[in-house]
Structures are given as structure tokens and as C-alpha cells.
Amino acid sequence: MSDREVDLVYLNSLLVDRLKVKRPPVAITYCTDGPPAGYEAVSVVACSIVRLAESGRRVYVDGQHHDCWVGQYHLGLLPKPDPFISSGDYLTMAQGFFTPEGARRNKAQSYSLPADTINALAAAPLNDVPDGVPVDLLVCIGSAQQAMQIAGAASVREGTFPHGELGPSACSSIFAAPWHTQNSVYAIGDGGGRAFNRVAVGEMFISIPRHHFRYIVELIENFRIDPQKMRELIMPSHAPTPGGVPC
């Protein structure tokens, strides 16, 4: 199965019906020639386009339509970002727990798309992407176990461990980190990103690049576990005796 042969509607059904993801999966597009036709501009924080797409809308943010300078910075939509944002100074102004050094290192270690890589970021329900619109990421919000399965799909099919994040802004983790690492990402997200997306306790963000979509399909289609056999293989106390009876 090649990367381009993955049927998004089928992938969506596997995630919802087989893995029981409670929140609708979302398709993210890095737009280099403007937003796709049929997508509406929304003036929101960048990370919240995930929740809007979960509700069935096709939306986008860009340099003119947004409500967060931090999101603009991490999406590379600020050619000359204000050092107030890029150095993390803003983190110390309304939050008592950030030190200036902690804030500076937070931004220094966070991923951002290079300036002018995209001119818009679009989101739509995974099972309702218009024909001809490329999909670069699958983003969903799920439990830790679902993150283990979805973000870990590539690890069991080709041996690539997923990339995990705790600390950066949600927009950095779910949109920029997969671009830089070319890898599946699971992330806790920051307080704002979790609040804007109404992420419940025990849930996290899962972000999968296009070239890993097929591994999710392969994982689910081949999902089989024989607990007794696994115990016999790895646990001496369950190993069969020469007569066929476990020790």
C-alpha cells in the first residue's frame, strides 16, 4: 500500500469504529498557494482549528485571520517575529511560574515552521475532505492507550518510534513537530492549547504525517493478540513443560 492509496474515509472508519476514538479525526493541510476552495477563514488561535474541524467545519487560519501571535510564530507566518514572542518573554508576563530563563529555553527548544513555508493552515473532518485537497497530517485527540496505538503504528510496522512532547505550545507540537521530525507525534499540549480544544484529563494530541497513514491501516487490519501464547514465549512461569503442561 503506497502513501497515496490510503482512503481517508476508510481510515476514519477504522479509527472511529475499530479503535473507538471518541472525537472525530481531523485532516490538516499545509497550504502553500492559499486556502483550499470551500474552507472558511476563522479568527481563532491556531490550535483550535482542530476542535472546529471536529464539529464538521472546514476552516483555515492565515496571516490575516487568526487570534494568536504565538500560533503565527510557530506556523512560520511571521516573517519578522517580535522578540517578545520568539524569546518567550510573554510567558513571564501573566504566569507566575515561568522564569525568564525557563521561558527562553521553552521557545528555543520548540519547533516552528520556517518562515514562509506555508501561507495558511487548513483543517477539515478526515471523512469530509474535498476531492483534490491534499492532506498532510491527521490530528486526533484521544486517550493514552489510543495514542500508543495510533502514534506507535509506524513503530510496529517499520520500527520508527514516535516523537513525544511535553512543554511546547500545542500549535508547535501538533503542527510544526511532525513537519520537522517527519514522524508521528503524541503531545500533552500546553494549558492554553488543551483549554481551547477542551482536552479532558487523560486525553492527549496525536498528530500523524501522511506517510505514516498506511501504518495505522496495517496495524488495525492485522491487529491480533494471543495473551496465552505471549506468556508462554516470554514468561518462564508459563513455559510449557516437555509434557505440554505449563510449569
Image (tube, rainbow, N blue to C red):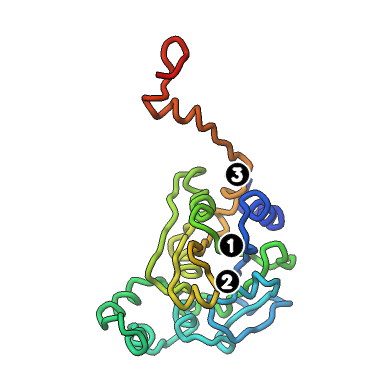
Residue 215 screen position, x and y as percent: 56, 48
Residue 175 screen position, x and y as percent: 50, 70
Q: Which of marks 2 and 3 is in front?
A: 3
Amino acid marked by disc 3: Glu
**Residue furthest top as drawn:** 243
Disc with the residue nearer the chain's start (2 vs 3)? 2
Residue 30 — which label? Answer: 2
Q: In this orientation, which residue lies closer to the viewer: 20 or 222? A: 20
| As drawn, 145 above or below 174 | above
At 67% across and 67% down in the image, what residue appears? 125
Q: Which of marks 2 and 1 is in front?
A: 1
Locate the N terminus by quadrant: top right
* Residue 136 visible in image: yes
Is disc 1 in contact with disc 3, using a CB cutoff of under 8 Å? no
At 57% across and 71% down in the image, what residue appears? 30
Q: Measure the alpha-carbon separation of dots 2 and 1.
A: 12 Å
Is disc 2 in contact with disc 3, using a CB cutoff of under 8 Å? no
Q: Measure the alpha-carbon separation of dots 1 and 3.
A: 16 Å
* 161 on left or right of 133: left
Disc with the residue nearer the chain's start (1 vs 3)? 1
Which residue position is annotated with label 1?
138
Amino acid marked by disc 1: Leu
Which residue position is annotated with label 3?
218
At 53% across and 54% down in the image, what residue appears? 146
Q: What element carries label 1?
A: strand
Amino acid marked by disc 2: Tyr
Residue 152 screen position, x and y as percent: 49, 50
| As drawn, 67 above or below 39 | below
Is disc 2 in contact with disc 1, using a CB cutoff of under 8 Å? no
Q: In this orientation, which residue lies closer to the viewer: 14 or 229? A: 229
Residue 231 screen position, x and y as percent: 44, 29
Locate the C terminus by quadrant: top left
